[in-house]
Amino acid sequence: MAPSKVLAGARVVLPAGTVDDGRVIVDGTRIADTAPPEAEVVDVSGHWVVPGFVDIHNHGGGGASFAGGTHEDILKGVDTHRRHGTTTVVASAVTGDLDFLARHAGVLAELAQQGDIAGIHFEGPFISPCRKGAHDEQLLRDPDPAEVRKLIDAAHGHAKMVTLATELPGGLDSVRLLAEHGVIAAVGHTDATYEQTLQAIDAGATVATHLFNAMPPLGHRAPGPITALLEDERITVELINDGTHLHPAALRLAFHHAGAARVAFITDAMDAAGFGDGRYLLGPMEVEVADGVARLVEGGSIAGSTLTLDRAFKRAVTVDGLPVEDVVAAISANPARLLGLADRVGSLEPGKDADLVVLDDAFDLVGVMRRGEWVVDPQLG
């Protein structure tokens, strides 16, 4: 077990607000309220200490894929994102053959059982061909509840979320099925109307998959899904804050209408996150990454992102002008609540896992701790 530590002198973001010259006590793998006499004092004066980041929508990183990789590949991607502050990550699949998705869910379920990932998100194949984005249209299918159930069962209790075009045949029944099984039904890659989106919310949908992206734009006569998802208090909206997927004004619009308590920052990252430009595969689709932007080789659609959550955090504060406390809610507390893990992660409170991130005064990452162990040690630079 790691020695006890006291991180002292930082601005610490707690659920009740920011404490200047605060401290966080780590005893073993947990946050504690009192420090033993032998605890190591780590001086983090002039820095911020915030909860470890929680990413509910992530396809890979470090050159490795969550969507089809081996155990070794997936762990490589997990480690890449941990080094950028994401101490809790859900592995997202992309559209594929249903039997392949079920088999790969078994691989991911083993890693979830070991605690390496926090669960599985199925993005596709139950999405609209009109808003397919970087998904293979030949493999798309209507959301048949029996097939949705097949994927849930293949995840052995570790399915956390399924993204659906709920206006398709079987969509509402699939939402009800997911809600009954405690799996998040997310509205996304959808061509739904405003009214159809409200029906999905009433059926049990609770998340908007990367709001604004892969759905009809907001219109003054046809408000579409964006308006329905923003105005309903039952919905948490995912936002990709990389400067490519969203204009800063769109992000501020979402925060203004949904409020900080209903926003979850995600990466929607693919293999190139934390790795570099080049050619990659996202599921069966070939992707070209240039200047950090991922696009399909054929057609040019944006194909996920190369984002890491430390960059999303810094951008939210320094470019978008959001309060640090609101960013912490969106990047840690809210996604932890969605996953049902708020008793363990998402905030710096005694008894919770010692998952935290140390940022300098420019909001650049300098330290990451997961369950009491340094992943990136701020004392070593």
Image (cartoon, rainbow, N blue to C red):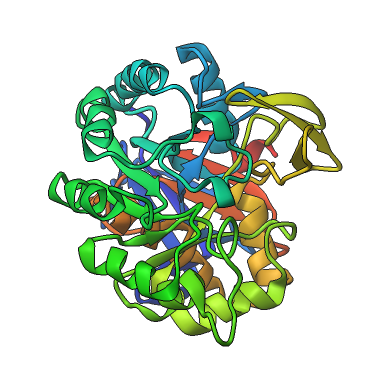
Where residue 85 sits in the image (x, y, percent)?
A: 55, 45
**How many numbered circles are shown?**
0
Q: Residue at x 25, y 23 (%)?
A: 154
What residue occupies the far right of the structure in this picture?
A: 291
Q: Residue furthest bottom?
A: 220
Q: Position of residue 326 (x, y in %)?
A: 49, 73
Quarter of the image with the N terminus is top left
80 horizontally vs 260: left or right = right
Q: Quadrant of the C terminus?
A: top right
Q: Residue furthest left?
A: 180
Furthest-front residue in this view: 169
69 vs 204, left or right, is: right
**Residue shown at 53%/80% (left/top)?**
222
Image side of residue 199 versus residue 279, left or right: left
Percent position (x, y) of residue 247? 72, 69
Quadrant assignment, res 158:
top left
Residue 215 spot, x, y in % from top left = 55, 61
Residue 305 visible? The answer is: yes
Q: Does residue 341 appear left or right of residue 162 in this picture?
A: left
- The picture quadrant where one finds residue 134 is top right
Residue at the image position 57 percent from the left and 51 percent from the top: 130
Q: Can the viewer see residue 8 in this picture? A: no
Q: Nearer the viewer, residue 33 or 245?
A: 245
The one of 304 and 381 positioned closer to us in this rendering: 304
Answer above or below: position of 100 versus 77.
Answer: above
